[in-house]
Amino acid sequence: MWWRPPGCLAMHAAPDVRGAAMSPEAVQSFYALVLGFAWAGFLSTGYQAMTRRPASFRLLSRGPRPSAFAAIPFLAFAAPFIIMRNTLRARRFDGRRFESVMVATIAAGMWSLMTGTVVVMAVAALNS
């Protein structure tokens, strides 16, 4: 009986990446993406700690009240966390398909990139 040869492990066939480097724009985008998700998680967790209920887009469905208008900036920055939390819960409990989870992840990632860019710009403005 012939056995196939063992697969090549990463340690044995490591590509030469010493000369490769990320552009400064790619690094800044990565930081903005990570900072956007971190800021969204911080806001959502803080909201949940103060109100004893998770943040939700239902904050907007209370009609035209001042609290609904005050929720708009909060939801603009907390949305990536809310989208990912709802997506992962729906995948686990409702059995959503991979495609819908992928689309929601891409949407949350893009939203996080945009909010992270705003946070980076705000921090840069405060430092100068």
Image: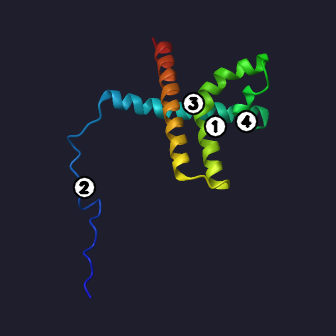
In the picture of the structure, the residue carrying the numbered disc 1 is 82
Q: Earlier in the sequence, mark 2 or mark 4?
A: 2
**Residue in the foreground of this view, choosing between 31 and 78:** 78
Residue of label 2 = 14
Residue type for callout 2:
Ala
Q: How far apart are the alpha carbons under marks 3 and 2?
A: 35 Å
Among the two numbered marks 3 and 2 on one chain, the one whose residue lies closer to the N terminus: 2
Which residue, given by chain and number where applicable, does mark 4 sit on? Answer: 48
Q: Are marks 1 and 2 in contact (CB under 8 Å)?
A: no
* Contact between labelled residues 3 and 1, with CB atoms less than 8 Å apart: no
- Outermost residue on the bottom side: it is 1
Q: Which mark is residue 39?
A: 3
Earlier-in-chain disc, 4 versus 3? 3
The reply to whether callout 4 and callout 3 are in contact (CB within 8 Å) is no
**Label 1 to label 3, Cα distance in Å?**
12 Å
Dot 1 surroundings within 10 Å: few (below 14), some, or many (20 or more)? Answer: some
Q: Residues within 10 Å of mark 3 (few under 14, many from 20)?
A: many
Q: Quadrant of the N terminus?
A: bottom left
> Cα distance, mark 1 to mark 4?
12 Å
Q: Which numbered disc covers residue 17?
A: none
Residue 42 picture quarter: top right
Whichever of labels 1 and 4 marks the residue nearer the N terminus, that label is 4
Amino acid carrying mark 1 in the image: Ile
Image position of 63 (left or right of 111)? right
The disc labelled 3 sits on which kind of residue?
A: Trp
Q: Give the structural element (helix, strand or loop) at label 2.
A: loop
Quarter of the figure with residue 87? top right
Q: Alpha-carbon neighbours of circle 2 within 10 Å: few (<14), some, or many (≥20)?
A: few
Camera-near label (1 vs 3) is 1
